[in-house]
Amino acid sequence: MITFDDIRAAARRIEGRVLRTPTLPSQALSRATGADIVLKLDNLQAVGSFKERGAANKLALLDESERRRGVITVSAGNHAQGVARHASLLGIDAVIVMPRFTPVAKVTRTAAWGARVVLHGDNFAEATAHANELCEREGRVFVHPYDDPEVMAGQGTFALELLEDAGELDTFVCPIGGGGLLSGCAVSARALRPGMDIIGVQVENYSSLSGFPGNEVLPPGGPTIAEGIAVLKVGRQPLEVMREHVSTVLTVPESAIETAITMLAEGAKQVSEGAGATALAAVLTYPELFRGRRVALPITGGNIDSRILANTLLRSLLRDGRLLCLKMEIPDRPGVLADISRKIGDAGGNIIEVSHQRLFTTPSVQAAELEVMIEARDPEHARALEAELSKTYIVRRA
């Protein structure tokens, strides 16, 4: 099991190679949640993620023979970029195996650091099996993304910095994929703040520790916006550490993660990928556990595909009632569209999109169906817009 001395040694080893990221309070998130929120911004790392901490420590410890052999790893993206960057800095040849579903942005950025990227398998397990085959065939050093004490010690420097910079904290909330970050941070936290609550978070489809601290379960897997923590089984060594130091593990739904991404963008002015927003998602899902407490949340990564980010923001607007889609049965005569536009504008709404269908959707040739997407200030304003249009037309929400 790793020790706090291992983490302090890792901090000295990677100093100057990895950014000491800001630790900042967020008044906007504090007001929204009722907790005193402090953010640690590892989305600002050179590769956009905390993962290069562990990669930098591991590669710095390789001897000359191991460096000549080259390295290989498997990752859904962030560990891949960390290994690729630090292998490039040290002149080490690197091969990165990534599942085929990995977002294009992460694949492109990994290749840009000079590593050879191999896309294989529909999930992390299949990619891992292929990486192990390549490792044996080519004689490379395998750099595990989380089940490695040197990687875990590197990740633990995240909490070391946080606790030095943040002052007193009641709770540290951390996402769990393979467990490397939480296990390393738990060791740091127990050494520096013995009484602090340490809470792990998993997304529903990958909640292998839903019975924590008892038996593990096999989750169903499947698509998730938090692909960075889409790991079916936590690493053996991280799990040993978590059983000793972690207070509890919470599970959050996909919708909470999407809401957290939006809140970080709008409130904290930070771009976060799905995995990086799961700690905030836990605070939103279980507010009674955090209200009135000083809570540290890691923004672990910011490598989110632009299209996914845009869709997430729009979906959150729909859920919040700030974006509403109305279907309206209207008479097919001149001036109706102008009348509807005027009513929406006079009521303070902003028309985003309009679809006008005459031929297939209404029972009468004298009628038409209009679908209009409207931006509102808040849910109450959205209801007022709907009510105003309902005075004249048959309206229903799409």
Image: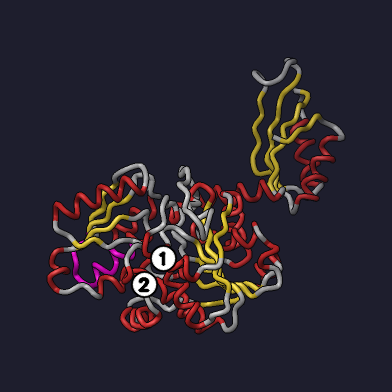
Viewer can see residue 274: no
Name the residue at 23% across, 52% down. Answer: 132
Are there few (<14), some (14-19), or many (20+) residues within 10 Å of tag 2? few
Label 1 near label 2: C-beta < 8 Å? yes
> Where is residue 325 shown, x and y percent of the image?
69, 39
Q: Is residue 109 magenta?
A: no
Is 150 on the left or on the right of 185, as rendered? left
Task: For marks 2 and 1, give the CA distance.
Answer: 8 Å
Q: Is residue 381 above or below residue 369?
A: below
Q: Residues within 10 Å of mark 1 (few under 14, many from 20)?
A: few
Helix, strand or loop at mark 1 = helix
- For image coordinates 83% across by 35% down, the residue present is 390
**On-image quarter of the C terminus:** top right
**Residue at which label 1 appears:** 240
Q: At which x and y percent is residue 48?
A: 42, 65
Q: Position of residue 99 (x, y in %)?
A: 34, 47
Instruction: Write down the region rendered in magenta.
Output: 81-94
- In front of the other: 334 or 53: 53
Locate the N terminus and report the quarter of the image it occupies.
bottom left
Note whether residue 397 is visible: yes
The amino acid at mark 2 is Met
Q: Residue 1 bears which disc, if any?
A: 2
Say what amino acid the circle numbered 1 marks. Answer: Glu
Report the magenta stretch's main SS. helix
Would you say 65 lies left or right of 295 here?
left
Q: Earlier in the sequence, mark 2 or mark 1?
A: 2
**Residue 82 counted in the magenta span:** yes
298 or 205, nearer to the observer? 205
Residue for point 46% across, 80% down = 161
